[in-house]
Amino acid sequence: MSKWCFNYESGEYEEIDRDGFSISQGGYVFNWDDSEFRREEEEFNRWGFYHSIWGDEDD
């Protein structure tokens, strides 16, 4: 899944995958803002897969 992220090399927002592949440029970028991916991963780790889908804290 890709997100609109800021590419510091080009100075523009681009559609970039989690692994750094820029769909907009058709190649990998190395200096880009991946904070949206990191935030998503932290939230997933904090709440867990079950809670993120069902919103249920009780097991």
Image (tube, rainbow, N blue to C red):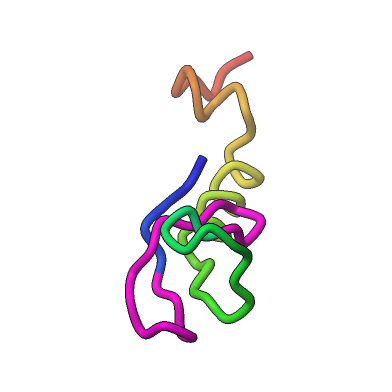
Residue 8 x, y percent position in the rendering: 46, 84
Residue 19 found in image quarter = bottom right
The count of marks equals 0
Image quadrant holding the C terminus, namely top right
Q: Name which residue lies at 48% across and 47% down.
A: 2
Q: Name which residue lies at 47% across and 17% down.
A: 54
* Region in magenta: 6-21
Residue 17 x, y percent position in the rendering: 55, 52
Residue farthest toward the left in the current orientation of the protein:
12
Residue 51 x, y percent position in the rendering: 54, 26
Q: Name which residue lies at 59% across and 72% down.
A: 29
Q: Give whichever of 12, 53 is nearer the camera.
A: 12
Residue farthest toward the top in the current orientation of the protein:
59
11 to the left or right of 21 = left
Residue 41 located within the stretch drawn in magenta: no
Residue 12 located within the stretch drawn in magenta: yes
Residue farthest toward the front in the current orientation of the protein:
26
Residue 14 found in image quarter = bottom left
Q: Name which residue lies at 48% across and 53% down.
A: 23
Residue 3 x, y percent position in the rendering: 42, 52
24 to the left or right of 28 = left
Residue 21 vertical position relative to residue 53 in the rendered view, above or below: below
Q: Give whichever of 19, 25 is nearer the camera.
A: 25
